[in-house]
Image (cartoon, rainbow, N blue to C red):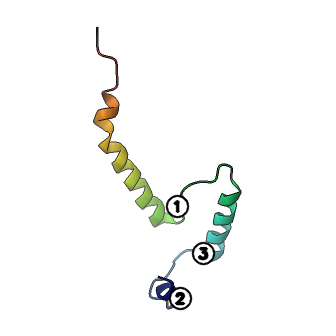
Amino acid sequence: MRRAVLGSAFPIPGDADKIAQAMLDAVEQHPAPLRLALGHDTYADARAALVARLAAQRELAQSMVQDEA
C-alpha cells in the first residue's frame, strides 16, 4: 500500500493537510470517534453500509412492542 501511494499508483484526491488536521482534531475529542469518514466517497460508503446494517435489523426492531394481553 505504501509503495502504491508513494508511487502515485493509488492517488489520494483529498487535501493531505486537511486530512492530517482532521485526524489530530479527532484525537482531541472526548470521547474520540472510533471511525473518521474523510472524503465524499468514504462518507457515502460508510453511510450505505450503516443503512444496510440497520435495514437488516428492521423486522426484529419493529417486533419489540408488547403483545396485547
In the image shown, does 54 or 39 lie closer to the viewer?
54
Q: Secondary structure at mark 1?
A: loop
Residue of label 1: 37
Residue 65, relative to residue 5: is it above or below?
A: above
Q: Earlier in the sequence, mark 2 or mark 3?
A: 2
Residue 3, relative to residue 54: is it above or below?
A: below
Q: How much space separates mark 3 and mark 1, taking CA atoms?
A: 14 Å
Q: Earlier in the sequence, mark 1 or mark 2?
A: 2
Query: Could you tell me the amino acid type at mark 2?
Result: Leu
In the image shown, does 57 or 14 lie closer to the viewer?
57
**Residue 55 left/right relative to 2:** left
Residue at image coords 55%, 74% = 14
Residue 32: x and y in percent read 63, 53
Residue 51: x and y in percent read 38, 48
Residue 68: x and y in percent read 28, 11
Residue of label 2: 6
Pointer 1 with pointer 2, Cβ within 8 A? no
Residue 69, relative to residue 37: is it above or below?
A: above
Q: Secondary structure at mark 3?
A: loop
Residue at image coords 55%, 60% = 36
Q: Nearer the viewer, mark 3 or mark 1?
A: 1
Query: Label 1 neighbourhood size at 10 Å, few (<14), some (14-19), many (20+)?
Result: some
Residue 53: x and y in percent read 35, 48
Residue at image coords 67%, 59% = 27
Residue at image coords 49%, 64% = 40
Q: Which mark is residue 15?
A: 3
Q: Nearer the viewer, mark 2 or mark 3?
A: 2
Quarter holding residue 56: top left
